[in-house]
Image (cartoon, rainbow, N blue to C red):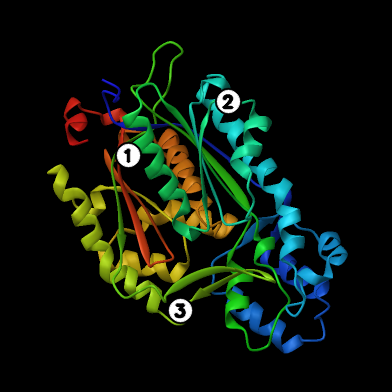
Amino acid sequence: MRRAQGPAAVLAIGTANPVNCMSQDEFLDLYFRATQSEHLTSLKDDFRRLYGKLSVQKRYFHHTEEVLSAHLEIIDPSSPSLDTRLEIVRDAVPELAAKASVNAITEWGRPATDITHLVVTTNSGAHVPGVDFRLMGLLGLRPSVRRSMLYLNGCFAGSAALRLAKDLAENNRGARVLVVCAELTIMLLRGPKEDCYQTIVDHGHFGDGAGAVIVGADPTTSPAERPLFHMVAATQTVIPESDHAINLRLTEDGLRGYLAPGKEVPVLIGDNIQQCLLDSFEPLGVQVKWNDLFWAMHPGSVPILDRIDEALQLEPEKLAPSRMVLREYGNMFGVSVIFVLDELRRRREMQGAEATPGWGVMMACGPGLTIETMILHTFSVYRDSVSAYV
C-alpha cells in the first residue's frame, strides 16, 4: 500500500555553471600564469597539443586567477592544501547546487516544501554536515526532508544518485525526490609537472557545474506535473579485474585521480557495454536495436565515446548530445549526465516529441570500473504496458 502505482519519472531538470567561462587557450594562459610556469614553454606546447585532441572547446570555473594567487599552496604540489580547498568548496558547492535546484524546482512548478527526499552527490568536499544539510536552508526545504549524501563516486555519481531516487520514489507513495550533483575542479587543480601526463589530462578535461532533477512517481494533475522520462529499470555492473583502471583519492594536496594510460579504459568499456545493455533489457522482455534508442551517455572523453560508437555501431547523431556537452562544458563528473538529459529534452522539444524514440538508455562509467545503466522511456509514446516492466 505504501508503494507508488507506476514507475518513477523525471519531472524537471535544472542546470547551473559558475560565471567564469574560458576557452581552452584562455584557460591555458591563465593556468601557466597563475602557477608561475610561463617559462616552461615546451610543457605548455605539450598541453596545447593534447588539448587539440580533446574536443573540449570551453569550460566554466569557480576559481579565478585572483583566488589562485591568494592561495599559492593550491598550485604547489609540495605544499599541503587540502584544508584550503575544502574551505573554498564548503560554501561554493552548496551555492552552485542551489542555483541548479532552484531552476529545477521552478520548472517543476510546486513549492520546495513538497520535496520529501534529497539525494546529493559530489566529489568536491568532505564535510559533515555537508551539501545536503546546507541545501535545506538555501532552498527552504522542510526539516523532515530525508537526506542521502554520496561522496567520491566519480563520473558515475549522477547516475547512481538517480538510481537511488528511482527506488525512493517507487517505494514511498507520493515521494518527490530532489537529486543534486555539483562539482568544482579546484579540488583537482595543481601546478604542472613535466613528467605528469595525468595532470595534463585532468586540466584539459574537467569543468565546474551543477545539475538537479526532480524525480517522482504517479504524476499529479493538480498542480500539473509534466513528466519527461520514465525511469523503467536501473542496474549497476562492475567490470571484473578493472579496479585499477580509474581511481580517486583525497590527499594532502587535494583530489587525485588516476586513469589507466592509453586505450585501456575505452577498450574495457567497449568490450563490456553490449552485455550490460542486454542484461538490462532482457528482464523487461523488450527487443530493441541500439540505433532505435535515444542515448544519454556520460561524456567521459572522446576516446570513450568513439569506442562506444564502434562497439554498438551507432549512427553519428546518437551520441551527439553527449559530444555537445563535452565540447561546451568539459567533463563535470556526475553532473554531466544531467546536462545530457537536459540537452536530449531540448532537442526533443525542438524536433517534436514524435521524433524521439520511445526507448532510451542513460549510462555512466566511473571508478570500479563501474557501469551504471538506466532504461528510460519517453512519455509522448507511453503505453500502459510500460508499467508492467517495473
* Residue that numbered label 1 is attached to: 356
Residue 27 image point, x, y percent: 72, 66
Secondary element under disc 1, as helix, strand or loop, is loop
Q: Residue furthest top?
A: 222
Q: Quadrant of the N terminus?
A: top left
Secondary element under disc 3, as helix, strand or loop, is loop
Of the two numbered discs 1 and 2 in the rendering, the one whose residue sits closer to the viewer: 2
Of the two numbered discs 3 and 1 in the rendering, the one whose residue sits closer to the viewer: 3
**Label 2: how many Cα within 10 Å (few below 14, some 14–19, many 20+):** some
Camera-nearest residue between 356 and 372 = 372
Camera-nearest residue between 70 and 312 = 70
Residue 368 image point, x, y percent: 39, 67
Instruction: Judge from the rendering whether residue 331 lies leftward or rightward of residue 64; answer left or right.
Output: left
**Label 3: how many Cα within 10 Å (few below 14, some 14–19, many 20+):** some
Task: Find the distance from the CA under tag 1 to the CA under tag 2.
Answer: 25 Å
Kind of residue at badge 2: Thr
Viewer can see residue 169 = yes
Residue 86: quadrant of the picture = bottom right
* Residue that numbered label 3 is attached to: 260
Q: Earlier in the sequence, mark 2 or mark 3?
A: 2
Kind of residue at badge 3: Ala
Q: Which mark is residue 106?
A: 2
Task: Find the distance from the CA under tag 2 to the CA under tag 3.
Answer: 41 Å
**Which residue is at 44% across, 38% downward?**
345
Camera-nearest residue between 124 and 196 = 124
Q: Earlier in the sequence, mark 1 or mark 2?
A: 2
Contact between marks 1 and 2 (CB within 8 A): the answer is: no
Task: Find the distance from the CA under tag 3 to the CA under tag 1.
Answer: 36 Å
Q: Earlier in the sequence, mark 3 or mark 1?
A: 3
Of the two numbered discs 2 and 3 in the rendering, the one whose residue sits closer to the viewer: 3
Secondary element under disc 2, as helix, strand or loop, is helix
Residue 207 image point, x, y percent: 62, 58
